[in-house]
Amino acid sequence: MFIFLLRHGDAEAHRIDRERSLSEFGQQQIWQTATKVREKNCQIEQVFHSGLKRARESAEIMTRELSLNCTFSEVTGLTPNDDIHHWAQQINRLEKSTLFVGHNPYMGALLGHLTQQRLSFALGQIVCLDIIANKANLLWTLKP
């Protein structure tokens, strides 16, 4: 099973963090990432996002650009400072290839926990992990 972790694109300033929209540049970043992911011919069966506007917009762009016909849900536990252990444990129980759309420092911490590697996570970056027997193998990473 494959897990995809995507950090949202660049966002505009807003006094309420939850309402920060993708900037035009951020929309372009996610579109560029989606174009590269399309070339990989990935099978994504469900999309989870944090519910923060910039993550939801990033997930919507990915879903549209990859022509995904799958479950699209806001889930808890993916916001910037959430505890990674909830999803670190749940990922091993998933039965469908899933795209998670979230934020730093959360996405970087989750990636590090799953792979036991310290990696940076740029805006609009996506990684693909192969989950086998509760072990995550980093297959590839793409930046806009």
Image (tube, helix red, strand yellow):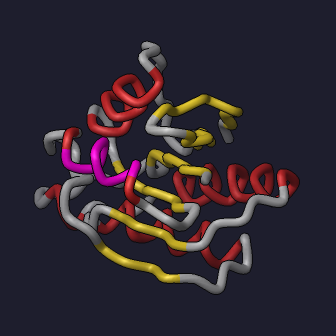
Is 26 positioned to the left or the right of 36 in the image?
Answer: left
Whether residue 46 is in magenta: the answer is no
Q: Residues in magenta?
A: 86-92
In the rendered view, would you say 109 is above or below 88?
above
Count of numbered circles in the view: 0
Establish if 80 lies above or below 76.
Answer: above
Residue placed at 75% from the left, 59% from the top? 42
Task: Give the answer, above or below, for where 68 lies relative to 52.
Answer: below
Q: Please tell me which residue lies in front, 131 or 45.
A: 131
Report whether 82 appears left or right of 45.
left
- Direction top: furthest residue: 118
User: Residue 53: x and y, percent?
Assistant: 31, 68
Quarter the C terminus occupies: top right
Which residue is rendered at x = 61% and y = 67% of the image? Answer: 62
Q: Pick the residue in front: 74 or 18.
A: 74
Residue 19 percent coordinates (x, y): 22, 67
